[in-house]
Amino acid sequence: MLKVRGLTKKYGDTEVLRGLDLTVRRGECFGLLGPNGAGKTTTLRLLLGLIEPDSGSIELAGFSVPKHAREARMKVGVVPQMDNLDPDFSVRENLFAYGRYFGMEKSAIAARVPHLLEFAGLAHKADAKITQLSGGMKRRLTLARALVHDPDILFLDEPTTGLDPQARHLIWQGLRQLIADGKTIVLTTHFMDEAERLTDRLAILDHGCLVAEGAPRALIESHIEPVVVEVFGEGLADWTRNHAASLCQRFETVGETLFCYNSNADTVIEALKHAPTLRYLHRPSSLEDVFLKLTGRDLRD
């Protein structure tokens, strides 16, 4: 569904993308992750033909982009980072208006709208104005709107940012349904648990380069130790100085927390029993640990 080779883009003297290669197979959910400034937004704009690359090739839904970007976009559904629903229209009218942008007949749109409203959990809000919807409802409507023309591939740009846990889980439920139905999805997100739950494969970008690619579980197994013990509390500096090197296969001190990475946490936990002023959290390693190891912990603005 998507093939990218040698993609580069510069703004002035800044290299935003440096020879990016990506392949997204039909029917998979593919994650595109990276810290702020990694090149994700530029990549999406290039893939949709909204800007032109300096070099490289893009094939989207069987069309060369940007040469045939208009034809490619007819096969694509987009959920932007910020909702851009028309506040003058009702929920139902937003779906109709969007379908008309793709040249669909009114009868064809009318046939799809009930299913889309049901999919989004908005059948009871069909005639409501956008201003009457909660944030989660607006997000679900934006997703339903992207499906009006039954696209071959969906681009979702941080689809659950700003939503409460209940709304996030409803969005995830809808995306799992789409994945089960065979839709191809390209997802950008800052929520690592979201990427772990939804994606079949993912790519991590940093400074315009691809730094890792693969299935979430495979990336965790290949890049990080199996367990993590997070230690914090009074006396941490002394405990770290006396014990971390001998008890941890790898460790980092970030602010007031020690991250101890190990194959087995038993020896660390046993030692911590003799440090009553310290507290700890024992957990399995996650995609977030991989992400921070590969891209660093420094704040990106």
Image (spheres, helix red, strand yellow):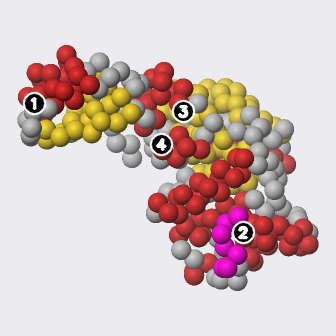
In the image, 250 versus 118, the foreground residue is 118
Q: Is residue 185 visible?
A: yes
In the image, residue 163 sits, relative to residue 132, either above or below, namely: above
Whole-angstrom CA distance, mark 4 to mark 1, is 34 Å
Q: Dot 3, how many residues are within 10 Å of its Cα: few (below 14), some (14-19), or many (20+)? A: many
**Residue 93: image location, x then y, percent:** 75, 77
**Residue 148: image location, x then y, percent:** 78, 63
What stretch of residues is rendered in magenta? 118-125
Which badge, 4 or 3, is on the more N-terminal residue?
4
Q: Nearer the viewer, mark 2 or mark 1?
A: 1
Q: Are marks 4 and 3 in contact (CB under 8 Å)?
A: no
Which badge, 4 or 1, is on the more N-terminal residue?
4
Which residue is drawn at the image coordinates 71% and 64% (left, top)? 119
Q: Amino acid at mark 2?
A: Glu
Q: Which residue is mark 3?
A: 216
Magenta stretch prevailing secondary structure: helix
Q: Which mark is residue 274?
A: 1
Q: Secondary structure at mark 3?
A: helix
**Residue 277: image location, x then y, percent:** 9, 40
Q: Are marks 4 and 1 in contact (CB under 8 Å)?
A: no
Q: Which residue is mark 4?
A: 192
Q: Residue furthest top?
A: 246
Which badge, 3 or 2, is on the more N-terminal residue?
2
Q: Which mark is residue 118?
A: 2
Whole-angstrom CA distance, mark 3 to mark 1, is 36 Å
Q: Secondary structure at mark 1?
A: loop
In the image, 160 versus 71, the foreground residue is 160
Can you tell which quarter of the image residue 250 is in?
A: top left
In the image, 218 versus 4, the foreground residue is 218
